[in-house]
Structure formats: C-alpha cells, structure tokens
Image (tube, helix red, strand yellow):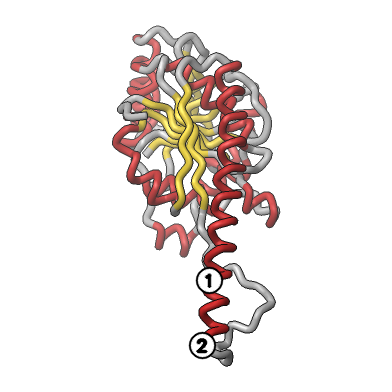
Amino acid sequence: MKNENKVLACVDQSRYADHVADYAAWAARRLDAPLELLHVIDRHPGQGTADDHSGAIGIDAQENLLSRLSTEDAMRTRSAREQGRVFLNRLRERALAAGAQQVDVRQRYGELEQTLTEQEADLRLLVLGRRGEAAEMTQRDLGRNVERVVRALHKPILTVTEGFTEPRRVMIAYDGGAVTRRGVDMVAGSPLFRGLPIHLLMSGRHDASAEKQLESAKTTLASAGFDVTAALVPGDAESVIARTTKEQAIDLLIMGAFSHSPLRSLLFGSKTADLLRSSRIPTLLLR
C-alpha cells in the first residue's frame, strides 16, 4: 500500500495485537484513511542446537552441519511466514468488521525501528502496542521497542493498552511548548477527534504567561467547533495527569513525547516513559 495518508498498525503475535487492530480500525474509520497491518519478523541467526559447533570436527562433518542448519533455518522461515500470514489475515478480518474500509497487510523480515523509519513518509498515524510479545514474556510494563520507535519517528504515534474502548473523552496534556502547540493545531484540523469533548490540562505554577498560553489553545480548539474545558493545575505533571484522567473519565490522552535527548533521559529518567508506564489509557504521542 503506497499512500501518504495511511494509518499503520504495527502488530506482533501477542494478545495485544487485537487491541492494536481495534484502535487502528477506529482511527482509520474516523480519518477515512486506508489501514495497513504490519508484522515485522525479527531474524534470530544465533539460535543454537545441542551439536558441537566448536570447529573440532572434520571438514565433511562441518559441511553436513552447515547444510542441515541452512535447511532448518529455511524451515523456520517458512513456518514463521505462514504463521504470520494466518495471523495477519485474521486481524484484517477483525479490522474490516470494525468498520475500516480499506485494509492491507504486510509482513517483513528485519528490525522494527528501521522498517518503520523507511515507511515514515507514507504515514499519517502509527498505532503501536505499549507492550508486545517480548514484554509479555518478561513482564515488563513498557515494551522495549516503544521508546526507540517514538524517538526515531516524527509522526503522531498512538500507543495502546490492553482492551479496547472507543474514545469518548479526550485530554491534551498541554505545556505551551512548540510540540503541544502543533498538537492543538493538529487536533483542531483533524477529523480524528471531531465531535468529542476535549479537556485541556496544564500543570505547574499559576502565572500570567501560562494562563495566556492555555487560553490561546482553548480558543483554537473552540474556534474549530470543539467543546473545550481548560484547567491549570499546580503540581507534578505525572501526578496531575494521572489524577485528572480518573476524575474526568478520560479515555484517550494526547501529549508531547521525549523532548530531551536519549542521554539526558538515561541520566535523569524520562517523563514520557514514566507517564506511559503509569497510564492505563491509550496515549497519542506528538513529536
């Protein structure tokens, strides 16, 4: 599928794939955009057997071993490809049943981050599970690929949690910076959230500058026809956002992502990652 306005859903064979497909179908329907389901198969050439690979075997034995390993690798590849084909076709039928009008599937061998970077120019929205197959096995609360993918791309990314609830109430975590200002403009001009009430939240100190920024964002959304409420709440952003999503029954959060460098995040932690770990609702990340 070659389309600069497509919604791309990245799925793996975990229980989270159904939820990713559901949210992607919802977004594609709202945007009237084609949907592509992408399954990236990561090669694992280091898979071993119980055989002696030390090299202390004869030349003929080495050739036989290499031939057998090559055959086994080809069999694994065919098996993975066939399993992926069945898996993607099931998700395609699920997305069509959910109302997506045009759904394509693609299976690729390679590395997830690189594959997505190659497709970035064609994307309108990426939908990604906050956890995946690897995180499910290790019980991590945030998949290892999420931060790398979000840092690598510069398109909106909807990270989803377990379960699907059609969004009815949306909140924008607004900080007055360039990213969230562009996010407000994007929401105002996009059909994705059209007709849904928007809660505009700013955390931090009450001052004239913050109040002016918040009022400007509210005016932009109201002028576009949105029902908007706005609040400036003192306190730590993570705590304020978590509390407000519960109090306001928010079911989708919009926020800026990873404004600092990876090195700074390594040294001081990342507010984005902290919020993703603590949030129980899908989050649209802006870059």
* Residue occupied by mark 2: 59
Position of 80 with respect to 285 (left or right) is right
Residue pictured at 45% horizontal, 12% vertical: 194
Does any portion of residue 255 appear in the rendered image?
no
- Regarding residue 85, the answer to whether it shows in the image is yes
In this view of the protein, which residue sits in the foreground, 78 or 101? Answer: 78
Q: Position of residue 164 (x, y in %)?
A: 65, 26
CA gap, disc 2 to disc 1?
Answer: 12 Å
- Residue 36 coordinates in the image, percent (x, y): 45, 30
- Residue at numbered disc 1: 67
Of residues 87 and 261, the one nearer the viewer is: 87
Q: Is residue 197 above or below residue 84?
A: above
User: Are dots 2 and 1 in contact, CB under 8 Å?
Assistant: no
Q: Amino acid at mark 1?
A: Ser
118 or 280: which is nearer to us? 118
Label 2's element? Answer: helix
Residue at 43% x, 28% y is 7
